[in-house]
Amino acid sequence: MNRLSRAVGALLARYLSARARGPYPHPAADLDAMRQLLQPADVVLVEGDRRISGAIKYLTQSTWSHAALFVGERGGVDAEGRVRALAEADTEHGIRAFPLDELKGYHLRICRPAGLAPEDALRVIDYVLARLGDRYDLKNVVDLARYLLPTPPVPAPWRRRMLALGSGDPTRAICSTLIAQAFQSVGFPILPVISAEVGSVPDCRDCMREIYHIRHHSLFVPRDFDVSPYFSVIKPSLMHTVDYRTLTWAKVDQMVGL
């Protein structure tokens, strides 16, 4: 990107990072519960309320518009002494570590890589932390900005591709591609493409084996961690179950349309 396009991208990033108008759709997560539940290399999905969130939600047909990685104390502390327990690729600040408190007020979900070895969890974390300070891929922001129309004319099969139009510069990333690269670096699957081929066992002509193909990291979106069969979904709100039998329900004639 030349100097002019970088300047335009930066201005656009600031505009898209502003909060969108309208009510926030879902209840905020309990951050105290989050602190008790989070484990190294957990992926935290965020339902954002920024202008750019609307484009990502539309293109991915999902609630989730952002993803961050839980790095724990390895992220260090900020100027206020708060643990920078999460790492992300942010449109304005690039790849950074930040405190969990910055997600106050947001609807969140934890996606935990099932069976990930502790040593590989640390390798995933270190992969992301090694890229702190790298820039956000602003070309991706420019591409997304075209789809902020109320009904963008983008056929469903093309929507994922619209999020893969980045610059290709290895010092740039967006949130989901950064995390996908980190897990791929240790061979942990997210949504691999699986094919079958005839096995190589001489006395078993009908034996088949599955071959896992790595999906290009630029094609990953936040919702992929939610739907992946290799990640457990953890809802912070369920840490304390509600006794539904004690709830007081309004009468039918008092119901409010939502």
Image: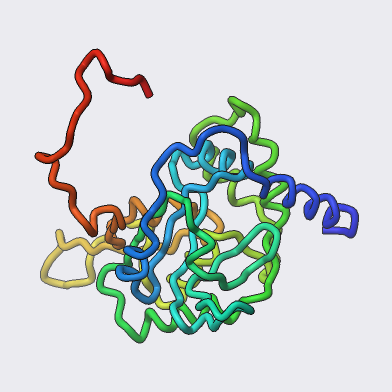
Pinpoint residue 82: horizontal percent, then vertical percent: 53, 77
Residue 144 drawn at (x, y percent): 65, 43
Is 212 situated left or right of 124 in this image?
A: left
Left or right, 1 with reference to 203 = right
Position of residue 51 measured from the top left corner of the image (x, y, whole percent) = 63, 41
Q: Where 229 falls versus 201 (above or below)?
A: above
* Between 24 and 147, the one nearer to me in the picture: 24
Question: Which quarter of the picture shows residue 211?
Answer: bottom left
Q: Give the camera-side residue of 72 and 193.
A: 72
- The quarter of the picture where the C terminus appears is top left
Image point (33%, 21%), residue name: 256
Q: Is residue 154 above or below residue 211?
A: above
Quadrant of residue 230 in the image? bottom left
Most distant residue in the top direction: 253
Image quadrant containing the N terminus: bottom right
The foreground one among 74 and 81 is: 81
Q: How many marks?
A: 0
